[in-house]
């Protein structure tokens, strides 16, 4: 079956300003050598999608640099391939986020030029490894207007989810709520949806012409409540990680140190592709002590690291200790420094003897390029 893909690269949240002041959500580094966009994009490529549009409104220089000519995803092709879809110059360019329908208006030409009958839409902040082909097949068989991929809540929790869906014994949707706390048995939307391409084009054109811009609230929830929209649920049972704020970013990186989660996300039959930097292997000094870490290429490790995610080209000097930390590309940890529950953005420097300690629920954040 032929399908095209749309990736929403933005997620507007003040909780992540420390990382998104000069890059958009999709370009945030993750797992030592990846960016968040790699998961949605790789899932599409592994599902046979060869035409992908990435919606980007602002701060997308890092995203464009990372994607490059898209050869790592085999999308540098004459027909289809990957397109960055920035907004048209208009009065909305400098306005706050007006919703996904407003963003999709910038993809109308992309959608009209594509011949695929179905569109898979995914947010960049949801981390999973998924084959979209069964999702599209479920959408076709259901005859519904839209298919929403969701995970089932197994126990009570206090987390609020963008969409919470209730179903009956026949998996028919009975309730669609937004910004809601799920109860056991409820389904939590993963911000992955499938629609017929022409239906999506008509929906975006109609709603934005009326000044209505929010996909989940103004289209899905509103029309479902009036009986004018049918929703199909596709249950997903494999591990899913979501990045919504600093705490979830930190915990989702630490989750990769769990072998079960790591094996579920990084499968040999459905690899997660990323930009290749051709770094040399990491160098482990005679006096270093490294345990339970993810280490990317190009590092020089003369100190100690425990239960941490270490990005490309990081230097940890002799006598330095890094515990339960995320150290991004090119950062330097000086001699004798001690870090625990700290996130160090790219190209930062922690000077010799510095002592930094945060909490797992509130890690210390060192911004990109800063010297501390």
Image (cartoon, rainbow, N blue to C red):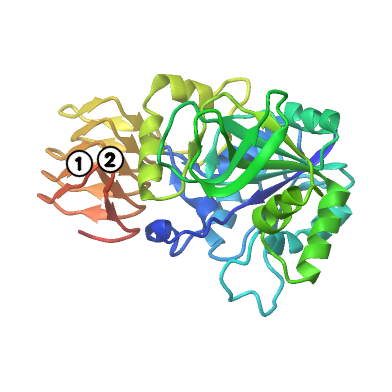
Q: Residue 175 falls in which quadrant of the image?
A: top right
| Rendered view: 129 above or below 351 | above
Mark 2: secondary structure: loop
Left/right of residue 46 with respect to residue 27 in the rendered view: right
Question: In front: 151, or 80?
Answer: 151
Q: Could you tell me if residue 110 is visible in this image?
A: yes
Residue 325 tag number: 2
Pinpoint residue 311: horizontal percent, then vertical percent.
37, 41
Q: Could you tell me if residue 72 is visible in this image?
A: no
Q: Residues within 10 Å of mark 2 (few under 14, many from 20)?
A: many
Left/right of residue 365 with respect to residue 74 in the rendered view: left
Query: Residue at left 81%, top 43%?
Result: 145
Q: Which residue is mark 1?
A: 340
| Rendered view: 4 above or below 106 | above
**Discs 1, 2 touching: Cβ within 8 Å:** yes
Question: In front: 298, or 145?
Answer: 145
Which comes before the other along the chain, label 1 or label 2?
A: 2
Pinpoint residue 16: horizontal percent, then vertical percent.
41, 56
Left/right of residue 55 with respect to residue 321 in the rendered view: right
Query: Residue at left 66%, top 35%?
Result: 149
């Amino acid at each position: 079956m032929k399908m095209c893909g749309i990736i929403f690269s933005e997620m507007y949240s003040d909780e992540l300003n420390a990382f998104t002041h000069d890059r958009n959500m999709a370009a945030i580094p993750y797992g030592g050598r990846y960016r968040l966009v790699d998961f949605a994009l790789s899932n599409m490529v592994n599902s046979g999608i060869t035409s992908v549009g990435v919606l980007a409104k602002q701060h997308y220089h890092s995203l464009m640099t990372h994607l490059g000519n898209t050869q790592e995803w085999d999308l540098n092709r004459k027909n289809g391939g990957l397109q960055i879809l920035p907004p048209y110059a208009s009065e909305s360019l400098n306005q706050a986020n007006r919703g996904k329908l407003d963003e999709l208006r910038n993809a109308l030409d992309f959608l009209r030029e594509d011949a695929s009958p179905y569109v898979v839409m995914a947010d960049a902040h949801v981390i999973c490894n998924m084959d979209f082909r069964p999702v599209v097949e479920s959408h076709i068989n259901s005859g519904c207007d839209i298919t929403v991929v969701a995970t089932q809540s197994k126990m009570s929790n206090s987390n609020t989810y963008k969409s919470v869906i209730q179903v009956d014994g026949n998996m028919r949707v009975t309730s669609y709520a937004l910004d809601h706390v799920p109860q056991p048995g409820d389904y939590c939307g993963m911000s992955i949806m499938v629609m017929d391409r022409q239906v999506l084009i008509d929906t975006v054109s109609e709603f934005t012409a009326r000044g209505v811009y929010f996909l989940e609230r103004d289209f899905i929830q509103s029309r479902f409540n009036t009986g004018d929209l049918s929703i199909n649920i596709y249950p997903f049972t494999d591990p899913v990680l979501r990045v919504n704020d600093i705490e979830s970013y930190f915990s989702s990186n630490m989750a990769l140190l769990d072998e079960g989660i790591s094996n579920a996300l990084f499968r040999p039959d459905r690899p997660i592709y990323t930009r290749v930097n051709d770094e040399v292997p990491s160098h482990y000094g005679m006096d270093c002590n490294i345990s339970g870490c993810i280490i990317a290429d190009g590092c020089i490790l003369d100190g100690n690291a425990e239960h941490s995610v270490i990005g490309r080209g990081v230097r940890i000097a002799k006598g330095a200790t890094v515990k339960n930390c995320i150290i991004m590309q090119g950062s330097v940890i000086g001699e004798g420094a001690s870090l625990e529950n700290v996130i160090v953005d790219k190209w930062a420097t922690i000077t010799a003897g510095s002592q930094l300690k945060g909490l797992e629920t509130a890690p210390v954040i060192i911004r990109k390029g800063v010297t501390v």
